């Protein structure tokens, strides 16, 4: 599944150029040449998985309040593009099913980040994976990731053959033991906190290290030089141009 991991993964689609976690952003990532995209999934009140990053609606839609306070039908009345640019007025918060259909149509690989509302870790993973599993082609690359260990434990139980990425920002002291316990295939780490030594420590576990969110070519070169396999970027097209041949090689 990870044998075709590219150097650059579109973060929430291509969020420098289109509203994050929308179908427009996924299309834009593909247009810019991204081979994989990363998107976030959370549940509505009626337990429908949708693409959204924040716990609340305020930043990326015309709504307010917590995401799980609305049913899907109510959520899809909101505009998810107007905040970004007038060109995207009318863009909606997509369902996971709609996003997967588009990602398949575009021929992209997927990193699905399970991003539960606090207290909904297990149910979010269960619902999202039960919907994704019959839709996802067995020959298409897929990585399931989360900061929340219970989400990764659910993924390990329900879909063990799909690689899991353990997301780390401020790692707990026992991060390596947790990674072993959940069978993490990758370690996905915050780029701003990394040094050559920290990357070496992560790589010493034998896992590829992925780093988020990298929009500067100089920083990307440094991370690749330290042994990072791939970076998540808001601007896959621009970063690819600035990196030149380095961006085109697989991890």
Image (cartoon, rainbow, N blue to C red):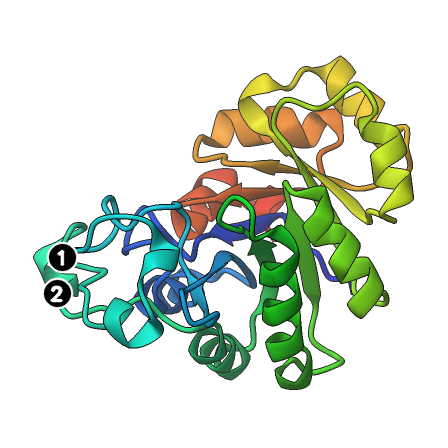
Left or right? Give the position of 16 relative to 3.
Answer: left
Mark 2 neighbour class, 10 Å CA radius: few under 14, some 14 to 19, many 20 or more: few
Residue 102: image quadrant is bottom left
* Residue closest to the eye, 131 or 201: 131
What percent of the width, then of the height, locates residue 103?
50, 74
Given contact means CB atoms under 8 Å apart, are the residues at marks 2 and 1 in contact?
yes
* Residue closest to the eye, 7 or 92: 92
What percent of the width, then of the height, locates residue 93?
31, 66
Q: Is residue 176 above or below residue 197?
A: below
Q: Secondary structure at mark 1?
A: loop
CA–CA distance in space, label 2 to label 1: 5 Å
Q: Which residue is mark 2?
A: 89
Q: Quadrant of the N terminus?
A: bottom right
Q: Residue at x 84, y 36 (%)?
A: 178
Label 2 vs 1, first from the N-terminus: 1
Q: Is residue 181 above or below residue 196?
A: below
Q: Residue at x 79, y 65 (%)?
A: 162
Q: Residue at x 75, y 60 (%)?
A: 155
Mark 1 neighbour class, 10 Å CA radius: few under 14, some 14 to 19, many 20 or more: some
* Residue closest to the eye, 91 or 246: 91
Q: Residue at x 54, y 21 (%)?
A: 192
- Residue 231 seen in the figure: yes
Left or right? Give the position of 81 relative to 234.
Answer: left
What percent of the width, then of the height, locates residue 234?
41, 45
User: How many numbered tags mark residues here?
Assistant: 2
Q: Which mark is residue 82?
A: 1
């Amino acid at each position: 599944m990870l044998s075709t991991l590219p150097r650059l993964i579109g973060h929430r689609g291509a969020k420098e150029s289109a509203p994050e976690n929308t179908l427009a952003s996924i299309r834009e990532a593909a247009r810019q040449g991204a081979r994989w995209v990363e998107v976030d999934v959370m549940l509505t009140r009626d337990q429908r998985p949708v693409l959204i990053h924040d716990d609340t609606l305020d930043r990326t839609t015309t709504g307010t309040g917590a995401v799980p306070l609305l049913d899907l039908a109510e959520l899809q009345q909101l505009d998810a593009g107007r905040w970004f640019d007038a060109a995207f007025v009318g863009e909606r918060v997509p369902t996971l099913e709609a996003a997967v259909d588009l990602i398949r149509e575009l021929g992209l690989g997927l990193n699905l980040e399970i991003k539960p509302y606090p207290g909904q870790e297990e149910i979010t993973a269960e619902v999202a994976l039960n919907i994704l599993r019959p839709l996802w082609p067995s020959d298409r690359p897929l990585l399931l990731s989360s900061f929340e260990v219970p989400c990764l434990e659910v993924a390990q139980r329900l879909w063990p053959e799909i690689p899991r990425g353990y997301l780390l920002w401020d790692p707990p002291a026992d991060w390596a033991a947790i990674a072993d316990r959940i069978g993490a295939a990758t370690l996905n780490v915050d780029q701003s906190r990394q040094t050559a030594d920290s990357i070496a420590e992560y790589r010493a576990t034998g896992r590829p290290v992925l780093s988020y969110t990298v929009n500067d070519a100089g920083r990307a070169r440094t991370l690749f030089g330290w042994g990072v396999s791939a970076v998540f970027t808001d601007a896959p097209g621009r970063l690819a141009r600035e990196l030149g041949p380095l961006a085109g090689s697989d991890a």
